Amino acid sequence: MRATRAFSQIKDAMVFAFNLPAIVELGTATGFDFELIDQAGLGHEKLTQARNQLLAEAAKHPDMLTSVRPNGLEDTPQFKIDIDQEKAQALGVSINDINTTLGAAWGGSYVNDFIDRGRVKKVYVMSEAKYRMLPDDIGDWYVRAADGQIPTRRGERAVLGVLLFSLGVRFAASGTLQRPAIYGNLRPGGTG
């Protein structure tokens, strides 16, 4: 196939073109779509570079291809909290309590319902916006140990996690493989 031959020039990827299987009353009438799969485990950044390289190559052929585009949202800044589970356990702090506190403080947590003038209203607990505006605000939150005390180390509140910043996908990919999709169409009258 011409597509497989053309894509074989990309050294950092293995690209195969094939027709979709026939499904009665369901199919692709025009255009194409495919997913890039990081089978080598090179990571999200390399996969995004490969996607962008493929889109750039497609843009060089406006006589044959049109509307070639990625599907999905661009990467977004993210932060991850790496909780030191051994330290938390040693200080008597429940991992579940840490997760519950972080979830309620940064996202909100449903508590219950109440009746107000004949209408059922939901109650959510969350911190005020000014206490969760910046990633560094995470240091202002604490979780009590099982004995009700705030865990300390050398007279200061114990730090039970590390904040890590990254750029990543907005939604989790299916399984462990990330699969950015690319859609496009053949230009009318273009055969290559």
Image (cartoon, rainbow, N blue to C red):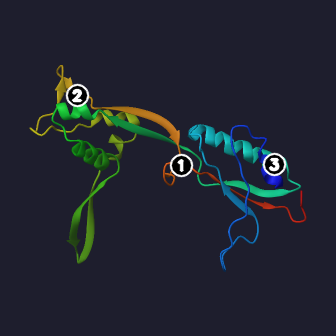
Earlier in the chain: of badge 3 and badge 1, it is 3
Q: Quadrant of the C terminus?
A: bottom right
* Image location of residue 133, percent across then percent down: 39, 41
Q: Nearer the viewer, residue 186 or 138?
A: 186
Element at label 3: helix
Which quarter of the figure has residue 65? bottom right
Residue type at mark 3 is Arg
Image-based side of 37 in relation to 68, left or right: left
Location of mark 1 (residue): 177
Badge 3 density bin: few <14, some 14–19, many ≥20, Cα 10 Å: few
Image-based side of 132 in relation to 47, left or right: left
* Image location of residue 188, percent across then percent down: 87, 65
Q: Residue at x 61, y 51 (%)?
A: 180
Location of mark 3 (residue): 5
For the question of whether residue 162 can be seen, the reply is: yes
* Image location of residue 83, percent across then percent down: 31, 35
Q: Which mark is residue 158?
A: 2
Q: Quadrant of the N terminus?
A: bottom right
Q: Residue at x 30, y 46 (%)?
A: 105
Question: In the picture shown, does residue 69 fall above or below 83?
Answer: below
Specify the farthest residue to the top.
Answer: 154
Residue type at mark 2 is Ala
Q: Are marks 3 and 1 in contact (CB under 8 Å)?
A: no
Image-based side of 125 in relation to 90, left or right: right
Specify the farthest residue to the bottom.
Answer: 25
Q: Nearer the viewer, residue 14 or 129?
A: 14
Which quarter of the figure has residue 137? top left
Query: Between tags 3 and 2, which lies in front?
Result: 3
Q: Are marks 1 and 2 in contact (CB under 8 Å)?
A: no
Alpha carbon of mark 3 to alpha carbon of mark 1: how far? 25 Å
Question: In the picture shown, does residue 6 fall above or below 17?
Answer: above
